[in-house]
Amino acid sequence: MLVAAPVRATDPSDRLDRFRTLAATRLTLAEVTDPARAGEAYREVYALLDDEVVENLASGDVFASPAFLQDRLDAFAEAWGGASLRITRIGRLTVGAFQVSEGAGSSSVRLYGAPRGEAQLIAALQREGRPSLYELPPAAAGSQFLVVWEGLLTGRGTRALRLDLVRQRGDEVAVVWSTAELFPDGLMAREYRLRGGEVRIRYELQYPGWIPGCDQQTEQEDVYRLAPDPGTFVRVARRQYNAWHLALHRSVAGLLEALAAGNRATLATLVPDAQLRQKLPARLERELACDAPDGANPGAVSVAASAGDLGPWALTFHRSGGQWRLPAANPVLQ
């Protein structure tokens, strides 16, 4: 018995050829000579990718399978070496995690479905960083997954990170939770881990006194768990690493503010030695220099400061009973 093979509506090589031409001309030129115009080239690239995926989904049979779609996208990625094009099936959705290059505006998560029986692009997320997809147990309203957007690794071992919880609601999808709401100024993460419905993120705090590239600064780790009520991630634990550094610089900030305001009561608390209080200049500011602790869990730390025209100072704080006090301070150049 002979079985008729499914027939494609159009020749797939046509679209691949257009993609290859676009990558070799418009995309390369835009990224190298005119980054501002790269966004237009990215939109054209994604339009071609959308057409490719939607046409295959509409064709059905083997053409609509994730394996076949991935083979097709691999051919597009080979035509443009900087592209990462991954696709998967999550519930009734076909989801693509695409990064055309490392340039701004080049990353997108594309969601395809067939509302009313017609294959189409139903939503797209545009963020910075390389996207990865993590399927989660389905919610009452439909399938859901986590999108992790990772930026480039910095010299200090952290990277920009954003997590979006995406949920299907009938024929539509929505972002129902995001770390962007918790960290409106951005999140620089050292590491993250996902296990089931739990997310663990260790990240920089970037508080006053934090300096890029210095060691032993305070970092924080949050644990979030997917909760049935309210149906989003809820923080269930938090811990700090090198918590002493944040506590130290709260005392440093208190000292600098007390000097500037002439607050004698606060100065007496932070600087118990009356002779040292008289010796300190009326105004000090932090220097952009790493602190010098006396060990991994220090009892004494030297902090660099500046008295303006009076030159640099070394402020040596000691820890006692969980509090940081200033028993010694001297001009660096005498």
Image (cartoon, rainbow, N blue to C red):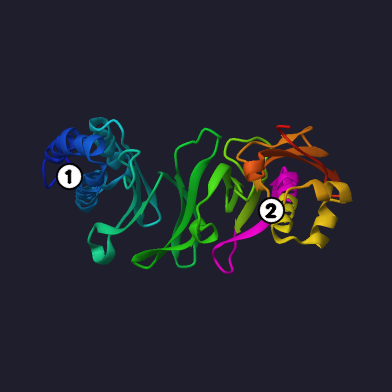
Residue at 28% in and 64% down: 115
- Which residue is depicted at the point 67% across and 41% down? 310
| Residue type indicated by callout 1 | Pro
- Whether residue 325 is visible, yes or no, is no
- Residue 231, magenta (yes or no): yes
Q: Nearer the viewer, residue 322 or 263?
A: 263
Please, what is the three-letter code of the amino acid marked with disc 2? Arg
Position of the N terminus by quadrant: top left
| Image coordinates for residue 139, horizontal then vertical, percent | 50, 63
The residue sitting at 54% across, 66% down in the picture is 231
Nearer the observer: mark 2 or 1; the answer is: 2
Task: Say which residue label 2 marks.
Answer: 238
**Magenta segment boundaries in residue numbering:** 226-249
- Does 47 lie within the magenta span? no
Residue shown at 46% from the left, 56% from the top: 164
Q: Quadrant of residue 166?
A: bottom left
Q: Secondary structure at mark 2?
A: strand
Earlier in the chain: of badge 2 and badge 1, it is 1
How crowded pointer 2 is (Cα within 10 Å; few <14, some 14-19, many 20+) is rated as few
User: Which mark is drawn over residue 47?
Assistant: none
Can residue 240 be seen by looking at this rendering?
Answer: yes
Q: Nearer the viewer, residue 320 or 316?
A: 316
Q: Look at the picture and state if 44 lies above or below 27.
A: below
**Pointer 1: what residue?**
6
Rendered location of residue 76, percent (x, y): 24, 36
Label 1 neighbour load within 10 Å: few <14, some 14-19, many 20+: few
Residues under labels 2 and 1: Cα distance? 55 Å
Q: Nearer the viewer, residue 137 or 108?
A: 108
* Disc 2 and disc 1 in contact, CB within 8 angstroms: no
Left or right of residue 136: residue 209 = right
Residue 22, image x, y percentages: 16, 38
